[in-house]
Amino acid sequence: MGMRKPEQPPADGRGASAGRGGRPADAGAAGLQPAGPETSRQRAGEEQAAPGRSTRKGAGGAGGAGEGGAAGGGGPAGAAGEGSEGGGSAERVRHPLAPNLGKNLQVLRRRLGFGISFDISIQEIVVGGRPAAVLAVDGLVSGALVQRLMQHLISVPGNTLADVRENAAEHLRRTVIGYYDVEVVETLDEVVDQVLAGLVCVLVDGDTHALIVDMRSYPARAVEEPDLERVTRGARDGFIETLLYNSALIRRRIRDPRLRMEALTAGRRSKTNIVLCYLDGVTPRYLPARLKKRIEEVDTDGLPMGTKSLEEYITGIRFNPLPIVRYTERPDVVAAHLLEGYVAILVDTTPQAMILPATAWSFMQHAEEYFQNPTVGTYLRWIRALGFFASFLLVPLWLGLVVSGPPPALSWVGPKGPAGVVPLLWQFLVLEVGIDVTRQAFVHTPTPLASSLGIIAAVLLGEFAVKVGLFTNEVVLYSALAAIGFFAIPNLEFALAVRLLRYLTIIPAGLWGIPGVLSGLFLIFLIFLFTRSFGIPYLWPLLPPNVEALVRVFLRSPIPTVRTRTLPGVEDRYTKPPTG
């Protein structure tokens, strides 16, 4: 009773909401009042929806006024915004709106490229006896809502604004526009930022204020299960490229008033919308502040690759292949980590969340374990670990034993026939590279042709290579087993890092045998040991040891028995009131 049924974005890819909180296309307006079910849904995560509400003048300004600086190179101050951007700094010259509508429109037409860009719409109308204009970007707004807005504005009786003592924009907001998401701004820079973000602007002659009305309707695809994180049971929803829907999927699972979703922007030109998600009072206090500072320091034109581009800014330049943030497309995984004290970062146009900090063990867990019995979940976790070790150690150990000479107990190890024309080390290296080339070919091959490519790569090439004497059967077998173990690792970034690090054991194994394997493993151990993720050691809770957390790494604990949070630095350690 009283629960509103959440709406899903249409399958045709239009009209749901978008990026940073675009409005659903069907948000009806009777007198521009939103249709009932949309209100609570749109407001969940509204702070991150626009640079707005409380952040339009702050975070939203991170890429604002200087748009014309790059285009037209510094003009006079009267050109309202034709100066340089100042490198994305928050300390920029702001250009107030002039009381003359014609001057404002002249500047805005130049800044927005009106007449050059086909999707910039500027409609001049008369409101209450005064000239006015409505600005929007076609394709980013709901056409039906904008039309009804203009009808209401045009229907204002003549001379209504003649005796208005307060500014006309504020008067229209209070008495004419029956819409809940309206803001009054005072600068041309804010007008440009918000129009390009998909909001509607209303300017009135004689007023130095403008109305910003959120009627966005970004293109969006339907919510569906992620391909990389499928489960046999459990939720089938996943993140999409629309930021508001992603934040709503998290808010739906955590209805705690302390759930914070801070709206930020990065990129002087892209003005990419970013949301920092964490549980206030649970997450380590230093973590959100540190991340927010690093995001605000991002100084670049844009973040075209979304979360991955942002990751390289907040983690710094790293040549260590081990990932120190975890990506997921599942909102239930994000919710579980937030409850444990982790931080999640959402980026507009990216259908995934970045979870941090992350340790080596984080990448070996999968949601499937928690949709099964604890015993079955533990078994699945161990099988996955077995696949990891098979991928990592099987080839170098076999090669090292063959080169060094196996002990009597392992006399069965080694080629059963001729070793082939190509040396064993080169056989493994060629197969490793061949497997990676095949994987890349699958990525770029249309689905109907993928099965044919698999037959060619896995059957014909391998069989013919053995028949002509280039490879031995054992080399093909162990390389195939290692490749299967690679696909058992649930995290793609970690799996790719493991494949790369394996060369540090395969090459020494082929040159020096078992001593080479041991030296390679020691080097890899040092890499793991000295890697840290935002202050957390990569091998934690193994090094430094934390018995309680380590037990949870190896065993899938029953949920009712989990009473504490083990992440170092959490403010609230107990998930349940402590007993005794």
Image (cartoon, rainbow, N blue to C red):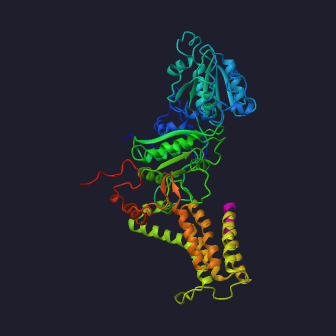
**Nearer-the-camera pick, 389 or 402:** 402
Magenta residues span: 442-451
Where is residue 17? Give x, y as percent: 56, 40
Quadrant holding the C terminus: bottom left
Location of residue 97 with respect to 501 vertically, above or below: above
Q: Is residue 241 above or below residue 175?
A: below
**Quadrant showing the N terminus:** top left
In this rendered view, identify the residue nearer to me: 487 or 21: 487
Q: Is residue 376 visible?
A: yes
**Number of residue marks:** 0
Between 258 and 567, the one lying in front of the other is 567
- Classified by dominant secondary structure, the portion drawn in magenta counts as helix
Q: Is residue 456 left or right of residue 286?
A: right
- Camera sees residue 7: no
Instruction: Tell me where residue 554 appears, x and y as whole percent.
Output: 42, 66
Q: Is residue 258 left or right of residue 197?
A: left
Residue at 46%, 70% (x, y): give it: 382
The question of residue 363 being in magenta is answered with: no
Query: What residue is drawn where x is 44% and y is 53%?
Result: 336
What is the x, y in percent for residue 255? 40, 44
Where on the picture, by quarter, is residue 495?
Answer: bottom right
- Residue 142 x, y percent position in the rendering: 60, 34
Q: Quadrant of residue 494?
A: bottom right
On the picture, is 473 further left or further right than 249? right
Q: Residue lying furthest top in this view?
A: 163
Could you tell me which residue is drawn at 53 percent across and 71 percent down?
A: 389
444 within the magenta span = yes
**What residue is shown at x 71% (from left), y 76% (from top)?**
461
